[in-house]
Image (spheres, rainbow, N blue to C red):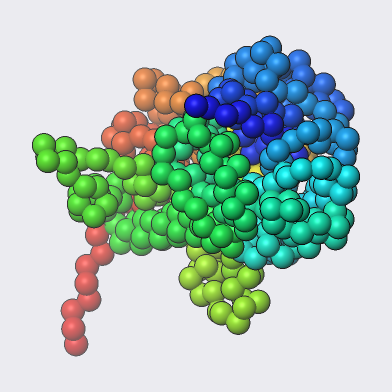
């Protein structure tokens, strides 16, 4: 029988608001806290303050049913929670994560625990490096509360999120696994209750292991992206190779893509991380690889591979531009380029560490006039790159006419329409930076793409 839990979520960013809304949708009583009164008011009207597919409808539903309410963050606003989820930001600072928001939230919760009767558990959901929850967070909570982790004090846990921006609601509602990091059995019991409605693999470990699972997961995915991009660059430099053909051959290996008993391929999502592009961005991969590199170095381990992942990714946006610039001419000053897509990936308005913005900056430094379009991230891009650096356009198809070259940098579905009107790119230089199209789709354009070069293959030198 389902036993609902009273949950308070501290923080209403991507993780906090999505988590709180999805938990409320499954029948829990949820309160979400934020320091900004305008955000609180918006949520209480059922209007999310972040862009995430499916969230507006779900939030409106749980608010209407009085399962979720928002309040301005304070000790009193924590209410009678049984579980408190810490979902505040942990931004990168000089390669390490900044724990100031985590410590502030833990201070508030610790003071609330001091005056509370009964057991409650504090669960970190923000991404923190291993040995943060059981040392830093525990220390603040115990100091502020005067209590200790255990049955007579409070519980402590770490429940990492595996939410992809743009797919966060579906990822939360249909996870492939849930990790129960816990320092006490009371927390393990409460996490069992919280996630009782979910039928998936549940992995119970200590908090350090839970923290490491999150970082290892993201570092390995980032490694795959950088390795594929580097190999694609090598293929293009050799010539006469399309890396998408290489990928087809590689992914036919049953270790990548298992065959069912009926002979059908599984086609797992992991293969999408092998498709070459202009690099990874967003709020997770760059920050998490940097943080793991930093903690490795501080532990006396030289992080050669992690450093290489970052180095390849940092260079990739410019590497992708090289063949495009070769076609644009020896002196690109004054040429006009239309950049399609500014978000770091489709389905989000997030431009943090966006490869598109790195490409835009490089083009502007060379004297190129950059026109740009994005379905939802345009305002955030201007705020990040600065006024006057790029010029936004509303009608991207009309803008193609005035451009010397066009770059698809974020694979929004909107831009798939190019394949239906290939003549739009006649005599244009076209960089398919995310491999949305096949090379022959635009016969009258100067088509270039990451991992693709139609030139005659290099001939090996004869031995002396």
From the viewer's perspective, is 65 left or right of 198?
right
Q: Quadrant of residue 161?
A: top right
Measured as percent of width and height from the top left, residue 218 is found at 51, 54
Q: Is 166 in front, or is 81?
A: 81
| Residue 334 seen from this side | no
In this rendering, is residue 193 above or below 137? Answer: above
**Residue 110 visible to an observer of this rendering:** yes
Taking the spot 16% from the left edge, 41% from the top edge, the residue there is 260
State which quadrant residue 87 falls in.
Answer: top right
Estimate the x, y position of residue 97 in percent, counting from the top left. Answer: 70, 59
Q: Is residue 36 left or right of residue 239?
A: right
Q: Position of residue 63 (x, y in %)?
A: 69, 17
Q: Is residue 428 above or below residue 257?
A: above
x and y, in percent, of residue 401 in the image = 53, 24
Q: Residue at x 19, y 87 (%)?
A: 464
The residue at the point 39 percent across, 35 percent down is: 436
Q: In the rendered view, tell whether residue 328 sits above or below residue 35.
A: below
């Amino acid at each position: 029988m389902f036993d609902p839990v009273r949950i308070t979520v501290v923080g209403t960013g991507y993780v906090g608001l999505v988590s709180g809304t999805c938990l409320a949708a499954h029948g829990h009583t949820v309160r979400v806290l934020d320091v900004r009164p305008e955000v609180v008011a918006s949520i209480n009207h059922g209007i999310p303050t972040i862009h995430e597919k499916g969230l507006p409808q779900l939030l409106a539903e749980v608010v209407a049913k009085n399962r979720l309410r928002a309040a301005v963050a304070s000790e009193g606003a924590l209410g009678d929670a049984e579980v408190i989820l810490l979902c505040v930001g942990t931004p990168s600072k000089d390669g390490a994560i900044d724990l100031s928001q985590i410590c502030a939230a833990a201070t508030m919760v610790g003071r609330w625990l001091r005056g509370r009767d009964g057991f409650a558990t504090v669960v970190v959901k923000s991404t923190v490096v291993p040995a943060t929850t059981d040392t830093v967070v525990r220390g603040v909570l115990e100091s502020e509360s005067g209590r200790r982790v255990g049955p007579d004090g409070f519980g402590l846990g770490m429940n990492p999120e595996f939410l992809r921006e743009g797919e966060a609601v579906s990822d939360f509602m249909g996870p492939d696994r849930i990790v129960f990091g816990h320092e006490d059995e009371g927390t393990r019991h409460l996490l069992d209750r919280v996630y009782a409605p979910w039928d998936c693999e549940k992995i119970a470990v200590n908090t350090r292991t839970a923290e490491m699972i999150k970082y290892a997961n993201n570092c390995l995915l980032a490694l795959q992206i950088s390795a594929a991009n580097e190999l694609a660059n090598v293929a293009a430099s050799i010539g006469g190779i399309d890396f998408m053909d290489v990928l087809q051959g590689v992914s036919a290996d049953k270790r990548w893509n298992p065959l069912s008993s009926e002979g059908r391929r599984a086609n797992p999502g992991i293969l999408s991380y092998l498709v070459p592009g202009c690099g990874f961005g967003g709020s997770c991969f760059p920050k998490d690889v940097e943080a793991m590199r930093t903690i490795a170095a501080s532990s006396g381990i030289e992080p050669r591979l992690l450093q290489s992942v970052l180095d390849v990714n940092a260079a990739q946006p410019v590497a992708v531009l090289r063949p495009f610039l070769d076609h644009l001419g020896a002196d690109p000053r004054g040429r006009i380029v239309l950049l399609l897509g500014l978000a770091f990936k489709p389905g989000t308005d997030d431009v943090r560490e966006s490869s598109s913005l790195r490409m835009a900056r490089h083009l502007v430094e060379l004297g190129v006039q950059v026109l740009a379009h994005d379905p939802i991230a345009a305002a955030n891009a201007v705020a990040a790159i600065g006024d006057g650096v790029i010029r936004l356009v509303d009608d991207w198809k009309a803008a193609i006419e005035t451009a010397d070259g066009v770059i698809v940098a974020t694979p929004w579905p909107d831009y798939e329409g190019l394949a239906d009107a290939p003549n739009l790119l006649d005599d244009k230089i076209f960089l398919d930076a995310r491999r949305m199209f096949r090379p022959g789709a635009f016969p009258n354009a100067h088509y270039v793409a990451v991992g693709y070069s139609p030139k005659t293959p290099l001939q090996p030198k004869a031995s002396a």
